[in-house]
Amino acid sequence: MRAIGIILAGGKGTRLYPMTKVVSKQLLPLYDKPMVYYPLSTLLLAGIKEILIISTPEAISQYEELLGDGTKLGISLQYKVQEKPRGLAEAFILGEDFIKNDSVCLILGDNVFYGQALTTLINEGASLCKGAKIFGYPVKNPCEFGVVEFDDNNKVISIEEKPKIPKSNYAVPGLYFYDNKVIEIAKNVKPSARGEIEITAINNEYLKNNELDVVLFGRGMAWFDTGTATGMLNAAEYIEAIQTRQGFYISCIEEIAYNKGFITKDQLRQLGEELKMTEYGQYIISLTEEVKPCKS
């Protein structure tokens, strides 16, 4: 059974003011694409075709205008309003009718993932039947994230949200896989001192029941939290460097949909033709053409 997906694209984006005073953060451009393309591409790479996008009352119609119902990508997109930001874990409560009896992958709308091992890791998560799977990523500033603590045998013993004195340098990125129990767990989470339903509380509940698997991202993986101007700049520079040097586009949702068999070559070309005035559109069109040898 393949999990369904949720993209949490709510919040006020206050760390990006004034850029986000009147625009949803995840609709801002990140190099050559809207930010929301990046988490969407991660779900597509995992083979997830049923996706719920959660955002604010002001922004939800803009996401619908940008992405539609997903038909052009061979997927199903639905939308849900989050009236006020009450914590990441509220996504499972808001999405209960969408999740139904399925497992679920939650990805934050401002997180960017890239690396050779990514597809394998997230496909394992998307096939999850029981328990939870999250990830750990080494960072220089763990105080700003949820942090994983390990014992001498590298077994996870605790997860702490934004600790003043972190017990490791492994942060938990915004990509989580859970079985269906997550809905009831989220409903029973008490708000933290910040007044939020914390995702860390859910992870600790699975940890308490010995049902939490933490997979560590290695050196070959890139993860960017683009919730700040510096984070956006760092991610954009990385994306530009990879695309310019290798010629492959990062998080081209049309290409991924085609490679996954969600759409045909003719449908892919049509999507490229709609954007043919841009380098992005020309790249999509080039995917439908035979590779021509370089001139000597």
Image (cartoon, rainbow, N blue to C red):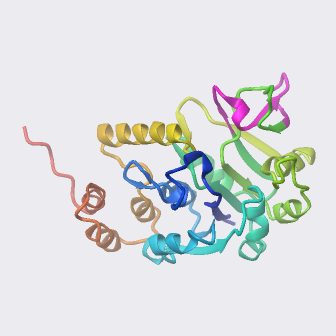
From the image, which quarter does the C terminus lie in? Answer: top left
Specify whether residue 147 is painted magenta.
yes
Residue 126 appears in view: no
Taking 151 as reference, is 179 above or below it?
below
When asked about the image quadrant of residue 173, the answer is top right
**Residue 119, position as x, y percentages in the image:** 55, 49
Q: How many numbered tags mark residues here? A: 0
Left or right: 166, with 283 as reference point? right
Q: Nearer the viewer, residue 187 or 194?
A: 194
Q: Nearer the viewer, residue 254 or 195?
A: 195
Which residue range is magenta in the image? 136-158
> Which residue does the image show at 72% across and 46% down from the upper left?
134
**Residue 258, position as x, y percentages in the image:** 41, 64
Left or right: 296, with 181 as reference point? left
**Residue 261, position as x, y percentages in the image:** 45, 67
> Which residue does the image show at 63% across and 36% down from the upper left?
217
**Residue 103, position as x, y percentages in the image:** 74, 64
Left or right: 142, with 26 as reference point? right
Residue 230 appears in view: yes
Taking 55 as reference, is 291 above or below it?
above
From the image, which quarter does the N terminus lie in? Answer: bottom right
> Which residue does the image show at 50% across and 53% down from the upper left?
38
